[in-house]
Amino acid sequence: MTSAPLLVIVDAANVVGSVPDGWWRDRRGAAERLRDRLAAEGLPQVAPAVEIVLVVEGAARGVESVPGVRVESADGSGDDRVVDLVAAARPARPCLVVTADRELRRRVTALGADVTGPRTAHP
């Protein structure tokens, strides 16, 4: 019996916003660059048997999935969508959420997810 692969959920707005590189001028483009980097490089600090989900919101909605990264556009709050994804996966599947948002961290750890900071996805 094989265990379910680790589900890695990336809070795109928080990760993109952690680096002051002008992302605010093109939020969608910044989310696409993060998606492409995740698809190409994965998360080197995390086991290779993972499924990566990138949660986008606001101006970044509509970014499309690519092989290796499923993109979820939040209808409202990106944080709420992250919590919904964790709730749907737990406890059957291990989850790792990539964010620095303290309140989001609190919400997902209460559901049993692990959390890591933005540098995991945006070195």
Image (tube, rainbow, N blue to C red):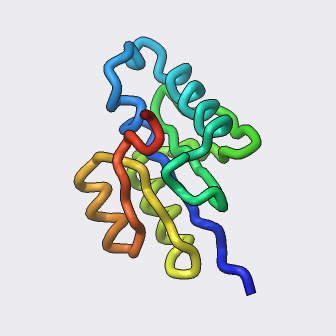
The extreme left residue here reads 102
| Image quarter of the C terminus | top left
Quadrant housing residue 83: bottom left
**Left/right of residue 5 with respect to residue 8 in the rendered view:** right
Above or below for 116 versus 13: below
Where is residue 24? Give x, y as percent. Answer: 38, 18
Picture mark count? 0
98 or 61, which is in the foreground?
A: 98
Place residue 18 in its image quadrant.
top left
Q: Is residue 20 left or right of residue 121?
A: left
Residue 58: x and y in percent read 46, 32
User: Depth check: 76 or 12 in front?
Assistant: 12
What residue is rendered at 39% in x and 65% in y? 114
Which residue: 57% across, 42% down? Answer: 73
Provide residue 2's location: percent of width, then percent of height: 72, 81
Residue 38 drawn above or below residue 9: above
- Where is 24 relative to 58, above or below? above
Residue 76 is left or right of residue 1, and the answer is left
Q: Is residue 9 visible?
A: yes
Say if 112 sits above or below 49 in the image.
Answer: below
Name the quarter where the N terminus is drawn.
Answer: bottom right
Which residue sits at x=64%, y=68%? 5
Q: Residue 63: x, y in percent?
A: 62, 32
Work out whether residue 40 or residue 32 is closer to the camera in this orientation and state it. 40
Q: Could you tell me if residue 62 is visible in this image?
A: no
